[in-house]
Amino acid sequence: MRKFALVAVFLLLCGTFAMAQKAELGAGWNYLHFDNGGVPGVDSSFPAGFFVDGTYYFAKIIGLAGDFEYNKHTFPAGELGDVSVDASALSFHAGPRVKVRMGKIEPFAHALFGFTRASGSGGGTSISDTVFSTKLGGGVDVGVAPHFAVRLGEFNYYMTRFNSASAFSFGGQDHQNNFTFSAGIVIR
């Protein structure tokens, strides 16, 4: 229920910004590839996810972006242990975004900072950990109507800092070099 409330408040705030004509609200499918530390046999793909983001442009090309992502994956029994494990990653990031408008083509880049919460449950046991994370990347939106665009793709280097003692640090590393890919729609 708490996650739903957070998403609802975020969507309401983003929608309010979009009404000001200086903002955008985007949503769609999200793919997460996490750094499994080279551990053999561990699937590193979280293909089932979604994103919601909003950007308020306080200057013509410079804005402040907020990004929410949720990804889920089920590891079958034998991959991480004797039982199947349901894993999820929930993240929120914010930071500057620069967008260049060249007709209908609108490339953008951003540096976003925030947190990631990873959770896992299986066999009657649940674990979770929340850490600082960073997303550096960008993408391309293509305008299809005055207030509507398609996000062809957004690629991000996605660094998380699960320390070596965390169950989410595969291979005993103190940070993970992940990446994400998103595609969807943008209302502006």
Image: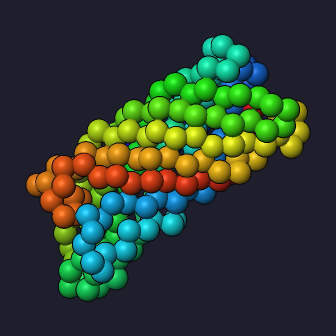
Residue for point 84% across, 37% down: 104
- x, y percent for residue 170: 22, 63
Q: Farthest top residue?
A: 59
The answer to whether any part of residue 5 appears in the image is no
**Where 132 sits versus 158, above or below?**
above
Apparent side of residue 29 relative to residue 5 in the rendered image (left or right): right
Residue positioned 55% across, 49% down in the render: 155
The residue nearer to you, when weighing 38 against 66, is 38
Instruction: Look at the picture and state if 151 lies above or below 109.
Output: below
Q: Is residue 141 above or below residue 74?
A: above
At which x and y percent is residue 81? 20, 80
Which quadrant of the rendered structure holds the C terminus? top right
Q: Is residue 162 visible?
A: yes
Residue at the image position 41 percent from the left and 47 percent from the top: 158
Q: Nearer the viewer, residue 67 or 136?
A: 136
Is 169 left, or right, of 64 in this rendering? Answer: left
Q: In the shown orientation, is residue 28 left or right of residue 175?
A: right
Q: Nearer the viewer, residue 87 or 104?
A: 104
Q: How many marks?
A: 0
Say which quarter of the image contains residue 57.
top right
The spot of residue 87 in percent (x, y) is: 34, 65
**Residue that protrudes farthest toward the right in the picture:** 145
